[in-house]
Image: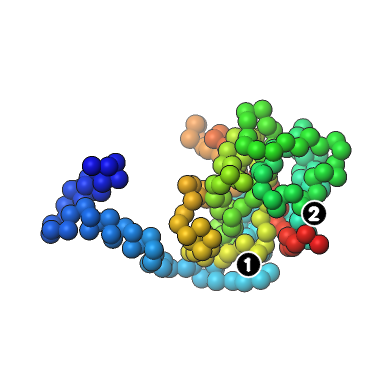
Amino acid sequence: MSARERLFERLWRALGRGGSGGPEELRREVEQRIADPRPHLVPARAKVAGEERIALFVRMAKAVGTEIERVGHIGEVGEAVMRFLRFHNLPRQVRLAPDPLLDLAGFEGHALLEVRRGTASADDPTGVTVAEAGVAETGTLVLASSPERPTMLAYLPENCVVVLPIARLDGSYEESWQRIRERFGRPPRSVNLVTGPSRTADIGLQLTMGAHGPRRLLVVLVDRTDSA
């Protein structure tokens, strides 16, 4: 029996189901739900479009401590990141995701900026990656793992910059999950939902930023991502 079969066997027993279908019936049910997911309720506030949707995302994201900058073209992202580094007096060093979109982001025009690519290491002060989607109803980023977007870029550096093309901004979580299904067929290895920078108040009810992830989060909203 494979590990997958053992898992379904344990789930079947835990659910206490009768009948003759056994774990194979449960497996087919899971496969069907993945292939044809049941829709959930969508909050009324998420049913917005255009500039109203952008305004909702910005409002909800700022409410949880996310910094927002909007640029007209992907080529302006590099300058937006430089403004973020200068404002917070951060080292002029960034680790970029090897995403082709960031090849157009204008980082090469800044001689004083040290740019490295690939997954994050412990000494990287700032990571820059690209969101698969954004959810306006809660100001949340949807980050999908891939070779072009290493997961650790959004978690290991103390500062995180996420590029979000406005064309990928959805009103609700349901729309973002549908976007992922259409692109990948099945969810990738990991999908991370990030709402604001890392924080905790577990110790003495004192709010601490950066407890288990970046203490600063900048989202760069991009109107156009063409190469013109």
**Mark 2 sits on what residue?**
75
Dot placed on the residue nearer the N-terminal end, 1 or 2: 1
Q: CA distance from mark 1 to mark 2?
A: 23 Å
Picture residue at 70% right of the left edge, 57% below the top: 221
Q: Secondary structure at mark 2?
A: helix
**Furthest residue in direction top, as rendered:** 123
Q: Quadrant of residue 125?
A: top right
Q: Is residue 173 visible?
A: no
Residue type, numbered disc 1: Arg
Q: Is residue 227 visible?
A: yes
**Mark 1 sits on what residue?**
53
The image shows residue 225 at horizontal and vertical percentages of 73, 60
Picture residue at 22% right of the left edge, 45% below the top: 10
Residue type, numbered disc 2: Gly
Picture residue at 56% right of the left edge, 53% below the top: 142
Q: In this rendering, is residue 12 above or below 180?
A: above
The image shows residue 199 at horizontal and vertical percentages of 56, 39
Q: Nearer the viewer, residue 210 or 63?
A: 210
Q: In this rendering, is residue 202 above or below 221?
A: above
Q: Nearer the viewer, mark 1 or mark 2?
A: 2
Q: Are marks 1 and 2 in contact (CB under 8 Å)?
A: no
Q: In this rendering, is residue 6 above or below 37?
A: above
Q: Is residue 34 left or right of residue 169?
A: left
Q: Nearer the viewer, residue 163 or 210?
A: 163
Q: Is residue 174 left or right of residue 110?
A: left
**Quadrant in which the N terminus is drawn:** top left
Q: In this rendering, is residue 80 above or below 112?
A: below
Q: How is the image coloured?
A: rainbow
Q: Mark 2: few, some, or many residues within 10 Å (few <14, many ≥20)?
A: many
